[in-house]
Image (spheres, rainbow, N blue to C red):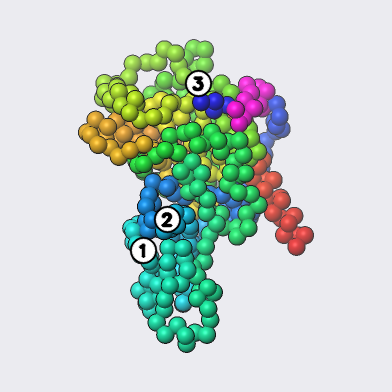
Amino acid sequence: MNVHQPFPMETPEDAAGHFATGPVPSLPYHDPEWWKLEREAIFKRTWLHVAHICEIPEPGCFIRKEIEFADASLVIVHGKDGVVRTFHNVCTHRGTELVQEPSGQRGQFTCMYHRWTFNTDGGLHSAPDFERFHVSKDSCALKQVRTEVLAGMVFINFDPEPRQSVREFFGPIAEEMEKLPVARAKDFTEFVYEIDANWKLNFDNFQENYHLRFIHPNTGASVFCPENPMGYPTHYGFSGPHRSQTLFTNPNPPPTPPVLLEGFMRGMALAKDEPHGFQKTDFKLYPCLHIVGLPPHQYSHTHMPLGPHRTRGTIRMYWPEKADCASRLFSREMSTFSVRDVLCEDRPAVEAGQRGVARIDQVHFQDHEVLLRHLYDTVQQEVADYLAEREAS
């Protein structure tokens, strides 16, 4: 798999050479008014990863999702016609929430209040004494949110007329995404956390290795060696608003603890049954999706903002089939908890950064923090474009 193809991959020095080198204002990491601009300029009109097709594998399957920054409760439905659609979880009669449970399978959706019933395509099927409303059923269909599926991943866009399709948004990366394990997944292992940090500050932690030697001296030891004592990535790449880095692997890593070794061995033994190869490139997909690849971990990490100072992170390890034996289950759980343990080491430093960033006027980026600067610059441009559009209108 040519994971480098979508990105012009460059050495750190060359990649950093395309960007300014000075400090930048710290305000976008903490200011509530700036967050309101990001919410309108970015998150309400950009494609966001919210689910996977394996959660709704058959017609009638649905999941409920709460998107706090948009004050929205959503129902993602696999329609009888095979199309995946997303609806606001609101009966169009008088606004009652339509679905209460987190997931399930139904042929229709009926409001508990007055028994308005909707089809899986969102159309109003029936309502008691409907002729007394003097409106058409078509005008009472559920309100949709634009939805597209790429590589098995379900993306939504709150903009009723998105500027791009999801495939156009990701450009040449879309083809590479379809080669990843996530595209063939039938199951996943998930853990969710909330952190007191701005979404960019939290995402930035996973865009640089400058901190590894200090925060992860043990869990990150496999990437340190005399030739690369800081464990820096070897290359960086950019494609529109998206970024990547090619990870470095120590050719002579320290011994693996016995229990982890057992898990790795079992996982590798099962790899022949799980049709995916390991990649060494991290995809940092705008605005807040991180797809990671490094043996034995391959997972997605979504940084969904809950406000200017709080983020919900969702980690998902995707699998091509359900775990059908104890060894496979052990291997998957071990991989997931290994990632969780690394995040637990990060958390105090990230939250300490959020508490302090408002006390400084500027932040600084070095050459190996070029991905952070790229995200910062992209957000700045998106907000500027939004303000210009608003002014012009």
- Which label sits in the foreground, 3 or 2? 2
Residue drawn at x 62%, y 25% is 9
What is the three-letter code of the residue carrying label 3? Answer: Phe
Q: x%, y% of residue 252?
A: 41, 12
Q: Quadrant of residue 100?
A: bottom left
- The span shown in magenta is 5-16
Q: x%, y% of residue 230?
A: 51, 21
- What residue occupies the far front of the structure in this picture? 81
Closer to the camera, 277 or 339? Answer: 277
The reply to whether residue 148 is visible in this rendering is yes
Question: Number of numbered discs present?
Answer: 3
Is 21 within the magenta? no
> What residue does disc 3 label?
248
> What residue does disc 1 label?
107
Residue drawn at x 64%, y 49% is 164
Mark number displayed over residue 78: 2
